[in-house]
Image (cartoon, rainbow, N blue to C red):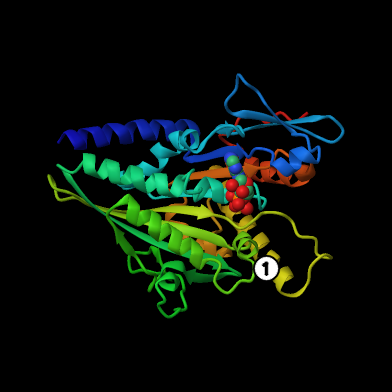
Amino acid sequence: KKYLEEFSERKRLYNEVIELKGNIRVFCRCRPLHQAEISNGSASVVDFDSSQENELQIICSDSSRKQFKFDHVYKPEDNQEAVFAQTMPIVTSVLDGYNVCIFAYGQTGTGKTFTMEGTSENRGVNYRTLEELFRVTKERNSFMKYQLFVSMLEVYNEKIRDLLAESSNQPAKKLEIKQSAEGTQEVPGLVETSVYSTDEVWELLKCGSQARSVGSTNANELSSRSHSLVRVTVVGENSINGQRTRSNLWLVDLAGSERVGRLDVEGERLKESQFINKSLSALGDVISALASKTAHIPYRNSKLTHMLQNSLGGDCKTLMFVQISPSSADLGETLCSLNFASRVRGVEHGPARKQT
Ligand code: ADP
């Protein structure tokens, strides 16, 4: 009973916040300058306002400044704990039956994988999320029974690969998106592994992430050209009223957003970059259509948005990390990413953007 009261209070407060701000959040994270960038004299072009946690300015090559506002801005010195502190309430809402999507967007080398996967010393959002989900499910043990399942997949050139099937040497199946009888988008045949402990999750995430590089001569290169997705499915049963919930949390490390000049590449590489451009702009179109409450949401324009259809829109929660580099050498791409993220954040709820 206490849980139900708590739940309806949380839902009421949540709806109030949605009324005020919409259910799409954009956090910007700037990585530190690398040692090599410092050595070759690269200066930081990002200026943070110490009194504002949600603003930054970019110093352009003609010394003019462009200002951007997001829901939160993380500076180079902000660590993984700091980033997770604001992410946690969004990811744990999957336990209350919400579908949630978290994306890391940006140029290759800006820290998308660092934010989502992290390293063994600096674990990222994916691991911390599961750790927190285990903690909360234990806390609610007296009235809610939860089961957690993890799937991992990759979208490369508009084809879906099952990373957990590959990491356990199962034969590769052709995966397609199908609509279920209830009208939800499913990927039949995708491996779903039940998980019970954080140690097990860490191993699983590592195996899945290693499977990304299979068949590639350069693991880093390939991973920057595919979207990597971790899906956490939560099945809950309330032992007081028997109510069941099933919801999905998607943790998405997107392909690098850098523009590839048509003249620089040909063949496979050109095809890849066209697929990436198409799916990233489809994602931008979907989120900005949702933010501006457009009637038609163009989910079907890419595998990524089609697969995530049930977890984007409605009362689903969306968080995008726009990752940027502070280096003057990356200025052009940084401005592109910040403009993309501002568009995604929506015109209706976003504050007036001052651009000097
Ligand atoms: P991406 O996934 O966008 O291609 P990576 O996550 O691989 O980028 O990051 C590139 C490099 O920068 C990695 O060596 C990573 O450890 C480092 N890095 C990125 N962000 C941070 C950060 N916030 N703090 C420390 N190192 C970072």
Instruction: Give the labeled residue for mark 1.
Output: 272
Of the 4 image quadrants, the one containing the C terminus is top right
Q: Image point 55% across, 39% down: which residue? A: 26
Q: Position of residue 174 (x, y in %)?
A: 47, 78
4 lies above or below 192: above
- Furthest-top residue in this view: 51
Is 301 situated left or right of 68 in this image?
Answer: left
- What element does badge 1 sit on? helix
- Furthest-bottom residue in this view: 171
Q: Position of residue 263 (x, y in %)?
A: 84, 65
164 lies above or below 242: below
- Furthest-right residue in this view: 62
Q: Position of residue 258 (x, y in %)?
A: 71, 54
Using the rendered view, name the quadrant where residue 150 is placed: bottom left
- Which of the two residues, 79 or 38, is positioned nearer the viewer here? 38
Q: Image point 66% across, 46% down: which residue? A: 340
- Which of the two residues, 292 or 140, is positioned nearer the viewer here? 140
Q: Position of residue 264 (x, y in %)?
A: 82, 65
Residue 154 can be seen in this image: yes
Q: Amino acid at mark 1?
A: Glu
- Which of the two residues, 40 or 156, is positioned nearer the viewer here? 40
